Structures are given as C-alpha cells and as structure tokens.
Image (cartoon, helix red, strand yellow):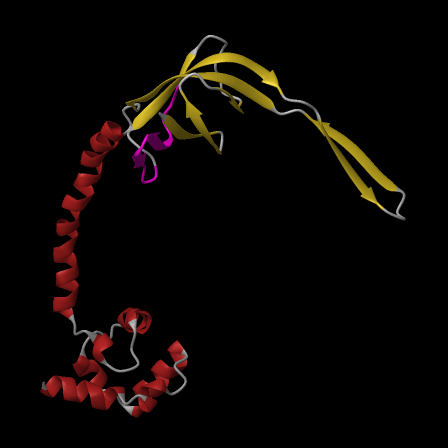
Amino acid sequence: MYAVVKTGGKQYRVAVGDKVKVESINAQEGDKVTLDQVLMIGDGDNVEVGTPTLDKSVEATVLSNGRGKKLRVVKFRRRQNSRTRTGHRQNYTELEITAIGGKAAAKKPAAKKAAPKAAPKKEEAPKAAPKKAAKKAEGDDLSKISGVGPVIVGKLEGMGITTFQQIADFTADDIARIDEELNFKGRIERDEWVKQAKEFLKG
C-alpha cells in the first residue's frame, strides 16, 4: 500500500516504513504527526483518488530536524566586474511513515457546525424582499425603456422620476434640463423615451 501526500507545498509518494525528508514541521524528535492532505491511496489494483483530498490520513513519527546540504548560488555578469556568491541551507524534518489510511482529522464536521451560522443570513433575505416589492409598487420599471439601464434608472430616481407617466409628460425644457444635469447628450430624444413611455402606458 502506498499514498501520495502533500505537505509544505510538495507531494510525496510514501509507504509504511519509508523515511522521507519533508519541509520543516513544527514538531520535536519522537513526536507523532498526522499528514491529513492525502491526494491518493493505492493498494494493488485498488486506487482511491481524492477530489482534491481523501478523508484519510497518514501517520508518521519524527526522526529528526535538520538542515540540508549547502547550495551555492553564483550570479555573474560578464564584462561588468560583477560577481555575487551566496549559499543556502534548507531546513527539513525527517519522518518515518507508520500507518496509511487512518481517518483524517475532523475537519468536515467543523464545516457542518459552521453551516448553521450561515443559515440565518438566508432567513434574513425574505425580510428584505417586501422592501424591494414596496419600491417597485411605488413606480414603474423604467428599465423597460430602450437605452435605460440600472445606472440610468438610479440617476432618474435621484431626480424623482420613477413612472412612465412622468417621462411621457416631458416637455422640451424638461428634456434639455435632464440632458444637461445628467450629461445624456441627446439620448432622451434619440432613443424616443417619451414615445416609448406613452406606449407602455397604453399597455
């Protein structure tokens, strides 16, 4: 049996008894650790693949904490009299795999407990619905007019224009004033708002 686990941003293929060096883990020598990000478990022809992880874990014992071999990094720029040398030693934790396929830490139950907290938000939504219905009842749906979108509807409501009747009653002075205030650049006449509003009033 083998497993593919993820820890420290890297993936490792491990089996019981294997000794692997992984990115440093906050654990002391002799401690038992659980790797709960199991991507795949294989046992002969039987292979389980997680989406993205399985509800299982891999148990391991910490053998040691140490630092890897020094890596030499040289940066050289020819004809520039530039040469830089640096070194790096990566910390690691050596693990011995002791068991594969145990139950993962209870993360999913925690998510279920959090679900009821989100439920009241859904219950609050119907309370807000009557307010929206009240707004619609006060005026007409001006977005039915060609060339009028949600942004323009909001601007018109800010000027107190909420019904087809108000638009149908526009005079030349009203159209000029609204064009100037909202920078419509002749949109009202070009899209024939007055004509459209009268047709909606007729039904």
Magenta stretch: includes residue 53: no
Query: In which quadrant of the rendered view does residue 71 lie?
Result: top right
Residue 178 on image: x %, y %? 34, 81
As drawn, which residue projects farthest toward the left?
Answer: 203
Q: Residue at x 70, y 24 (%)?
A: 70
User: Image height check: is 27 above or below 87?
Assistant: above
Magenta stretch: includes residue 41: yes
- Location of the N terminus by quadrant is top left
Magenta span: predominant SS is strand
Q: Residue at x 22, y 39 (%)?
A: 118
Residue 16 on image: x %, y %? 40, 19
User: Image height check: is 55 above or below 142?
Assistant: above
Query: In which quadrant of the rendered view does residue 120 lie?
Result: top left
User: Image height check: is 198 above or below 15?
Assistant: below
- Location of the C terminus by quadrant is bottom left
Q: Is residue 109 left or right of residue 190?
A: left
Q: Residue at x 38, y 30 (%)?
A: 37
Q: Is residue 87 left or right of residue 50?
A: right
Observer-nearest of 16 and 127: 16
Q: Residue at x 28, y 72 (%)?
A: 153
User: Image height check: is 123 above or below 86?
Assistant: below
Residues shaded magenta: 34-52
